[in-house]
Amino acid sequence: MTGSAGERRRAAVVALVAAAAYLPSLGGAFQFDDYNVIVNEPAVHSGAALLAALSGGVRPLLKASYALNWSLGHGPLGFHLFNIAVHALNAALIYAIGRRLCERWLSGSKAEGAALAAALMFALHPAQTEAVTYICGRSSSLMASFYLGAVLLSLRGVPGLCPAALFTLAVAVKESAMPVPVALLLFELVAPGRPRWKEIARRQAPVWLAAGAVALAMLLSARYRDLLGYGFTQRSAMDNLLTQLNGVFYLLARLITLRGFNVDPGLPELSAWTPALAAGAAGLVALLAFALSSLRRRPEIGFGVMWFFLQLAPTNSFVPRLEPANDRQLYLACWGPLLALAVSFARAASPR
């Protein structure tokens, strides 16, 4: 990570805080799906077995990370060390990205303080626990490393092929990285001045081309088609809408209240509107409309809300999932509202 010496020091502090918070997880054991995808899965027990299984599988880079840990030995400890290191890296990346955003909206020490505060909240928010301490929850955190790397390179003006490569690696960890191209557009929309669309299109074209190629590869993959087909047989479009809305409300409650976290919340499938659900849906529409209208006037608010829903779009929208919500879906999504909170506080605070 490049940047000034002060920026590197603060990024290192954020990373150390993130790692220190999760050191108690080093004594954890394998849990739940860890047995299905790691312990009892021969395909991730050696490099040769992994290569043999790649042609008909999904998430090859995620499985490669499992195979690396398994080959190195050390049992669950090695897996937990990997997860903590990934979270520490992500916290540093979040700080670096947030600093560049905050410099657009705030001046001097306020920009620095807001970026640092948002990164620390990201590192320590209890919603991150599942993605860090649940070994196979690394699908979210490891994906985020490549996702955030692509964003940071783009913000630094690195040619589009490099962000495109990191985006592709992110999708190879988990499909929910697909919003990266839209996220890059969101960063442009909250930049000062009017967007220069021709320049943006030229700079971001490789990422969008990579997204098209990845989407086509998924459609051509029999495994991905089977997974999508199975999902759509589980519930109707309307039942899925209601169930997914309930999942979003669950995640919002975890983000705001900082309580009630559960590795397996077991949310019910819904098939009928209720007054509470209808009121919540109206509130979400109003919130999105407010965010869109705020992109120029209060960009931190518009960015924070849009970032949150953009990260949830792959898991809580049209594609049915057996589990409507898991805490790890908040891993990347939570940063947007936390950044908006930090910037709003910095605007109201004294320079000191």
Image (cartoon, rainbow, N blue to C red):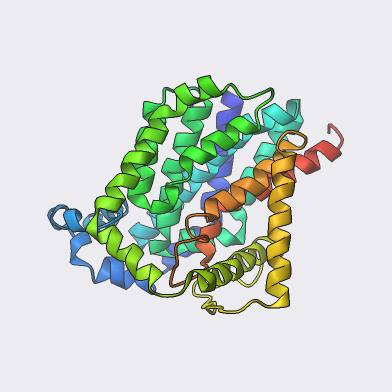
Horizontal side of residue 241 vs 69, given as left or right: right
Viewer-proximal residue among 175 and 162: 175
- Res 252 → quadrant: bottom right
Horizontal side of residue 53 vs 146, given as left or right: left
Horizontal side of residue 24 vs 31, given as left or right: right
Viewer-proximal residue among 347 and 203: 203
Q: Residue at x 74, y 41 (%)?
A: 293
Where is residue 140 drawn, in percent x and y? 44, 55
Residue 104 appears anywhere in the view: yes
Residue 85 appears anywhere in the view: no
Location of the C terminus (image quadrant): top right
Q: From what the image shows, is residue 154 above or below residue 238?
A: above
How many tags in the picture? 0
Horizontal side of residue 27 vs 281, given as left or right: left
Q: Residue at x 73, y 61 (%)?
A: 283
Viewer-proximal residue among 116 and 242: 242
Where is residue 104 drawn, in percent x and y? 69, 27
Q: Residue at x 66, y 33 (%)?
A: 190
Where is residue 148 drawn, in percent x and y? 48, 40
Where is residue 282 drawn, in percent x and y? 72, 62
Q: Residue at x 47, y 29 (%)?
A: 153
- Res 348 → quadrant: top right
Q: From what the image shows, is residue 240 above or below residue 73?
A: below
